[in-house]
Image (tube, helix red, strand yellow):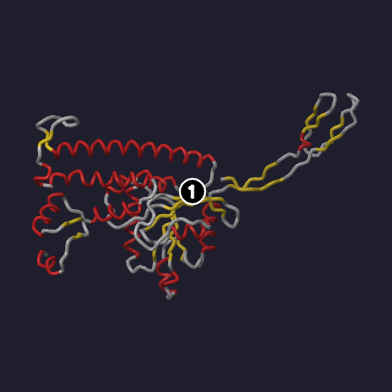
């Protein structure tokens, strides 16, 4: 490996797995180049994609927790003794000072994230009071979730053909063809062997998945490894304890697949629909399936809603209640006015 790195003038080695701090340090000493693992690469991508304050805090928290155990492998750089204000005393090493500062920073960020989580919980409570169903878009990264959200809700959420283009959850209001209202939420994309550190750091964001009434599992069916990607997403949902949520598989990018047989094979034994968010193909069918799901949990009721004539008011400061089609006449008080209550039958679904 050292020979190959020298031939190619490599300055960085990326390993598709997690490394312990000692493994990373030993490889760097042997190869003489910087070595990072899968988690460090994902964190670096996340740091470039984060836009909101919450997203930046979550990325910083994950980076601090990742780097904390790796401070000990920096050799003589952290072997100096420190003293003075802000340190424990003359006998405290720079390593101990840096660790203490990182612990303090982690605690501060966790406190800020907890405050943001409470605000999000308050918004979630208000949303529940409105009784509008929540539908969450989940799936492997770069499956087309943001593009689908934009197409359905006529929004302009950032969407691009790259990994983890979306880190922050985005919720939009959508009215389906039969006037069913829902809230559609876009979430961070999943990936194979998603580090547990990231799941913990982004827990506040991923709570949207737990609160959803329906999950739309968006799959990039043009990828030859789509089955492995489906399994990767299911594993993350298990970690979130959301694997039992009602799920509709949405096979996206079917415009890149010409074979009808392959479409049937993908949908076999699954509640699914094939669409193309880019071209708009079968989006009507997708909305119908979403609407059908919520109609199954609704109750049809017939209510009697009275018109203003339900109460008969007279100038003599007396009132008499009418019911049905009965005519009410007040002659004893000298009032000859009459009223007729009317009934109106309305039928609507109540969730």
Provide residue 330's location: percent of width, then percent of height: 87, 28
* Left or right side of 211 for 349: right
Residue 176 lies, in percent from the top left, at 56, 55
User: In percent of the image, x 31 and y 39: which residue is there?
Assistant: 109
Tell me the quadrant of the picture where the C terminus can be found.
top right
Q: Which residue is mark 1?
A: 134
Q: In the rendered image, which quarter contains the N terminus?
A: bottom left
> Residue 76 lies in what quarter of the image?
top left
Name the residue furthest bottom: 258
**Residue sitting at 39 percent across and 47 percent down?**
52
Looking at the rendered structure, the secondary structure element under dot 1 is strand
Residue under the image location 40 percent in, 69 percent down = 265
Q: Is residue 13 left or right of residue 242?
A: left
Please indicate whether residue 35 sits to the left or right of residue 306 in the image: left
* Number of numbered discs on residues: 1
Measured along the vertical axis of the image, is residue 79 above or below residue 192?
A: above
Which residue is drawn at the image coordinates 12% and 69% (left, top)?
Answer: 7
Q: Nearer the viewer, residue 135 or 345?
A: 135
Q: Position of residue 4 (x, y in %)?
A: 12, 68
Nearer-the-camera pick, 344 or 27: 27
Q: Is residue 250 above or below residue 317?
A: below
Give how far across and how far down residue 247 sits, in percent.
Answer: 43, 55
The crowding category of the residue bearing disc 1, from other C-alpha atoms within 10 Å (few below 14, some 14 to 19, many at least 20), is: many
């Amino acid at each position: 490996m050292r020979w190959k790195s020298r031939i190619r003038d490599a300055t960085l080695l990326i390993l598709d797995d997690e490394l312990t701090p000692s493994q990373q340090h030993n490889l760097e000493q042997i190869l003489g180049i910087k070595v990072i693992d899968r988690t460090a690469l994902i964190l670096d991508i996340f740091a470039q994609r984060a836009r909101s304050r919450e997203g930046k805090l979550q990325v910083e928290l994950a980076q601090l927790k990742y780097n904390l155990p790796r401070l000990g492998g920096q050799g003589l750089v952290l072997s100096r003794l420190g003293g003075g204000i802000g340190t424990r005393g003359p006998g405290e090493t720079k390593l101990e000072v840096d660790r203490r500062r990182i612990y303090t920073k982690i605690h501060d960020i966790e406190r800020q994230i907890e405050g943001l989580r409470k605000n999000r919980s308050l918004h979630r409570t208000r949303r529940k009071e409105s009784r509008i169903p929540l539908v969450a878009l989940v799936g492997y990264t770069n499956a087309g979730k943001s593009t689908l959200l934009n197409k359905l809700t006529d929004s302009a959420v950032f969407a691009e053909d790259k990994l983890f283009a979306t880190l922050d959850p985005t919720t939009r209001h959508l009215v389906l063809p039969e006037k069913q209202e829902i809230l559609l939420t876009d979430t961070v994309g999943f990936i194979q062997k998603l580090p547990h550190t990231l799941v913990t750091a982004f827990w506040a964001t991923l709570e949207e998945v737990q609160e959803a009434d329906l999950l739309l599992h968006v799959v990039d069916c043009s990828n030859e490894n789509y089955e492995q990607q489906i399994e990767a997403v299911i594993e993350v949902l298990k970690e979130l304890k959301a694997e039992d949520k009602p799920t509709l598989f949405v096979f996206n990018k079917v415009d890149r697949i010409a074979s009808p047989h392959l479409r049937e094979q993908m949908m076999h034994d699954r509640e699914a629909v094939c669409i193309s968010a880019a071209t708009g193909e079968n989006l009507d069918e997708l909305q119908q399936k979403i609407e059908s799901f919520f109609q199954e949990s609704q109750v049809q009721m017939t209510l009697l809603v009275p018109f203003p004539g339900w109460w008969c008011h007279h100038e003599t400061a007396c009132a008499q209640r009418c019911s049905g089609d009965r005519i009410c006449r007040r002659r004893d008080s000298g009032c000859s006015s009459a009223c007729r209550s009317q009934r109106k039958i309305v039928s609507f679904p109540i969730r």
